[in-house]
Image (cartoon, rainbow, N blue to C red):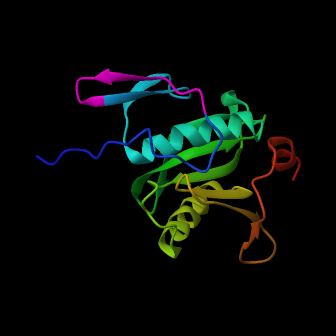
Amino acid sequence: MPRTPHANPAVRLNLPPAPLQMRGGPKGVEIWDVLRRRWLLLTPEEWVRQNFVHYLNASCRVPLSLMANEVAIRLNETSKRCDTVIYTSALRPLAIVEYKAPEVALTREVFEQIVRYNIVLRVRYLIVSNGLCHYCCRVEYEGERPRISFMPEIPLYTEMAQS
């Protein structure tokens, strides 16, 4: 049986240092997910997710209580999972965050994936990161088709929530 690739915590991401908790587990190194409140196998994508959640909380001031990891949605009769969803204080979806492992390029297909998820959630912000590169798009719902524009940086939560 193929082994799950494990993240190398020594891989330096383009994010501020985060106070992550790790331990040895039966299948390898595990990392504490502050949102799901449980230990998870440390994969390259999980390494990015946990660092990015801490970045959103510490740098963008997104309250931990208004974020959720692995949010299930139904899209065209299939079950999908959004990596992280950020909510308004009224618990309406505000942003979807999609993570990839650091070695995965952020291609058009990655953006198409998050845009498909947004058919269901209709959020204002789409964020994609592989831990090295981060992109944020604002979605405007004017007319028949949403208009997506790239932003120079990920805004603070207060700015996102006001829009």
Quadrant in the rendering for residue 7: top left
Residue for point 75% across, 53% down: 154
Q: Position of residue 153 (x, y in %)?
A: 77, 58
Tell me: 92 left or right of 49: right
Observer-nearest of 65 and 2: 2
Q: Position of residue 144 (x, y in %)?
A: 74, 78
Observer-nearest of 14 and 154: 14
Does residue 50 sit above or below 124 in this rendering?
A: above
State whether residue 122 appears in this view: no
Tell me: 124 left or right of 14: right
Residue for point 78% across, 64% down: 152
Residue for point 50% across, 66% down: 110
Observer-nearest of 152 and 112: 152
Q: Residue furthest bottom?
A: 144
State whether residue 70 appears in this view: yes
Q: Which residues are magenta?
A: 18-28
